[in-house]
Amino acid sequence: MLRKPGTTPGITTPAALKAFRQHGPETLSDLQFLENWTTRPRYTAASVLRAGQIRRTNPDLMHDITSSIRQRGK
């Protein structure tokens, strides 16, 4: 599938895009997970542990993603 240059599949918030550009493609699944978790949290053991681990290591990123999604929803 072709996509526009400079776009990233599945990442919609500016904070996640910035983190992706800084840290590379190995962060894509974590960033997609965080955006999905913020909009539709699933409370399975695995998803709670993953969200907690990412949130503890990147609290500013989690805050920025959450803020972006809440602003978009208004």
Image (cartoon, rainbow, N blue to C red):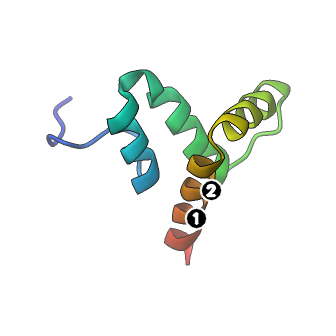
Lateral position of residue 21 relative to residue 62, left or right: left
Q: Which class describes the residues within 10 Å of circle 1: few (<14), some (14-19), or many (20+)?
A: some
Label of residue 50 in the image: none
Q: Is residue 64 left or right of residue 21?
A: right
State the residue position of label 1: 67
Left or right: residue 6 versus residue 21 is left
Q: Residue at x 49, y 70 (%)?
A: 72
Mark 2: few, some, or many residues within 10 Å (few <14, many ≥20)? Answer: few
For image coordinates 65% across by 51% down, the residue present is 38
* Pointer 2 residue: 63
Tag 2, which secondary structure?
helix
Q: Is residue 71 above or below residue 24?
A: below
Query: What is the x, y in percent for residue 53?
Result: 73, 30
Q: Gap between marks 1 and 2, in whole Å? A: 6 Å
Q: Amino acid at mark 2?
A: His
Taking the spot 37% from the left edge, 45% from the top edge, the residue there is: 17
At mark 1, the secondary structure is helix
- Whether pointer 1 and pointer 2 mark residues with C-beta atoms closer than 8 Å, the reply is yes
Q: Is residue 13 visible?
A: no
Q: Position of residue 40 (x, y in %)?
A: 68, 49
Residue at (31% x, 39% y) in the render: 8
Q: Amino acid at mark 1?
A: Ser
Q: Quadrant of residue 67?
A: bottom right
Work out which quarter of the rendered image holds the C terminus and state it: bottom right
Instruction: Classify the position of the N terminus by image quarter.
Output: top left
**Residue 66, horizontal then vertical, whole percent:** 61, 58
